[in-house]
Image (cartoon, grey):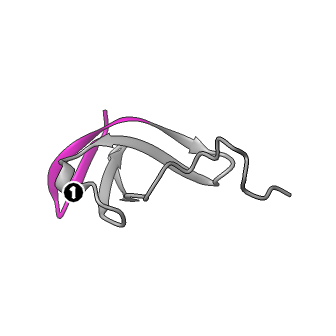
Amino acid sequence: NEAIYKDGELVGRATSGGYGWRLGKSLVLAMVPPAMATEGETFEIEILGQRHKATVIPESPFDPDNVRLRA
């Protein structure tokens, strides 16, 4: 349950996270106020005492229909 900050203020908590090997990026699910959960909104997440930038993405990066091109 890592802390989520906006402008230095605690605004939420991460519920789960991990590295998305197919995406090459870390992903996190977090609980923040609905008004802040807009596409492109940035936060900081504190992991092991260090803060890292986090950005709200528009939709799930998962491709259930396997439509995206793979090489």
| 15 left or right, relative to 64 | left
**Which residue is at the front of the view, 38 or 48?**
38
Which residue corresponds to the image point at 30% horizontal and 64% vertical from the top-left?
41
Q: Quarter-wise, where is residue 44 in the image? A: bottom left
Which residue corresponds to the image point at 43% horizontal and 43% vertical from the top-left?
28
| 23 left or right, relative to 7 | right
| 6 left or right, relative to 14 | left
Residue range highlighted in magenta: 1-16
Decide whether residue 36 is among the magenta residues: no
| 63 left or right, relative to 56 | right
Q: Position of residue 31 (x, y in %)?
A: 26, 40
Q: Quarter-wise, where is residue 12 in the image? A: top left
Q: Is residue 7 above or below residue 16?
A: below
Amino acid type shown at disc 1: Met
**Which residue is at the front of the view, 50 or 41?**
41
**Which residue is at the front of the view, 51 or 14?**
14
Q: Position of residue 5 (x, y in %)?
A: 22, 53
Q: Quarter-wise, where is residue 8 in the image? A: bottom left
**Which residue is at the front of the view, 69 or 30?**
69
**Residue labelled with disc 1:** 36
Decide whether residue 11 is among the magenta residues: yes
